[in-house]
Image: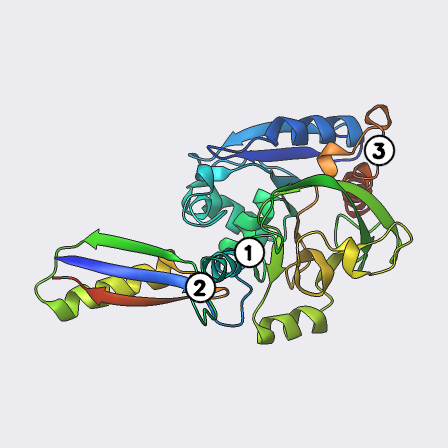
Amino acid sequence: MSSGARPRVSVVLFPGSNCDHDAVHAVETAIGADARLVWHDGTDLGRPDLVVLPGGFSYGDYLRCGALARFSPVMDSVRDFAASGGPVLGICNGFQVLCEAGLLPGALLANSGQRFLCQDVHVRVETIRTPFTSDLTKGDVLRLPIAHGDGNWRAEEATWDDVVAHDQVVFRYCDAAGERVASANPNGSHDDVAGVCNRARNVVGLMPHPERASEEILGNADGARLFRSFASGLLGRSA
Amino acid sequence: MKVQVTVVPKSGVLDPQGKAIAGALTRLGFPGVGDVRAGKVFRVEVEAKDAAEAKALAEQMAVKLLCNPVIEEFEAEVLG
């Protein structure tokens, strides 16, 4: 990005995505982004600085959440973009798609309580070594909304050891004070994981919806901090 | 030829649906109901020269798409 230019954000639209416009609005509002929707059936991402895979129910959650979206033609471009170091953010269903596509470790199971959950949660920032947490402080507590039926993240033992060894847990569920207590984990996810990144740290997925909490007028702008981290990192890189 | 792939949550993986079904079976009076795994069954028509080839195809389908090995396990069989 040249200095002074607006960050270019491409939001991928799968059949069944439903948080795509919210994501466009959030990055426009939070960081003045030049944001566009990219239909899943093409391969042109439009030279973005950031790719967002939004929430929703891609392909009706058929087979497994995110399992069919990974075969969309656009995912080849997302894969290439990620492999070249481009930042990718997967929110909710977008997180599930990234796990199914093998771009993030683990998988998302049905919530342990068997219910779809729509509520605010608190998450703690566990690492600042990602494009979306670089401006935050480790231990910061964010209040963000969740809306999912399958947010129970888990990984095989060897994968989990790897995730821990490489500091890939980005967010953990916690209470308002930042303490990890059982009652603060809404879906039974392993070790209270709410979001993870890949080994290269440029691909991040999380179950909560930062794009739904990015404006003071909506009562909560904690989510905007993720987008602002990305934007200030972008400025830093181009300076 | 018709093949069948059965996919269930791996043992050790929490299966809230299976757990709820186990509870319901117990409440219905079925004695000694233990672990229940709730999964999916796929019946697929394939073109294959024999049962071995059909089974191999079913296994490839499971590995590439039908089953997520992080959380699930599968069995493939030929129905004939």
Tell me the residue that label 2 is attached to.
B37
Query: Where is the C terminus of chain A found, in terms of image quarters?
Result: top right
Q: Is residue B2 left or right of residue A202?
A: left
Nearer to me, B34 or A56: B34
Q: Mark 3 vs mark 2: tell me if same chain.
A: no
Of the two numbered discs 3 and 1 in the rendering, the one whose residue sits closer to the viewer: 1
**What's the CA distance linking mark 3 and mark 2?**
41 Å
Considering only vertical position in the picture, is A53 above or below A110? above
Label 1 SS: strand
**What's the CA distance linking mark 1 and mark 2?**
14 Å
- Tell me the number on the disc at residue A41: none
Label 2 SS: loop
Q: The residue under label 2 is which amino acid type?
A: Arg
Tell me the residue that label 1 is attached to.
A109
Q: Mark 3 vs mark 1: tell me if same chain.
A: yes
Q: Position of residue A122 (x, y in %)?
A: 81, 48
Tell me the residue that label 3 is attached to.
A220
Q: Badge 1: how crowded within 10 Å, few (<14), some, or many (20+)? A: many
Q: Position of residue A113 (x, y in %)?
A: 62, 52
Q: Position of residue A103 (x, y in %)?
A: 55, 56
Considering only vertical position in the picture, is A165 above or below A76? below
Of the two numbered discs 1 and 2 in the rendering, the one whose residue sits closer to the viewer: 2
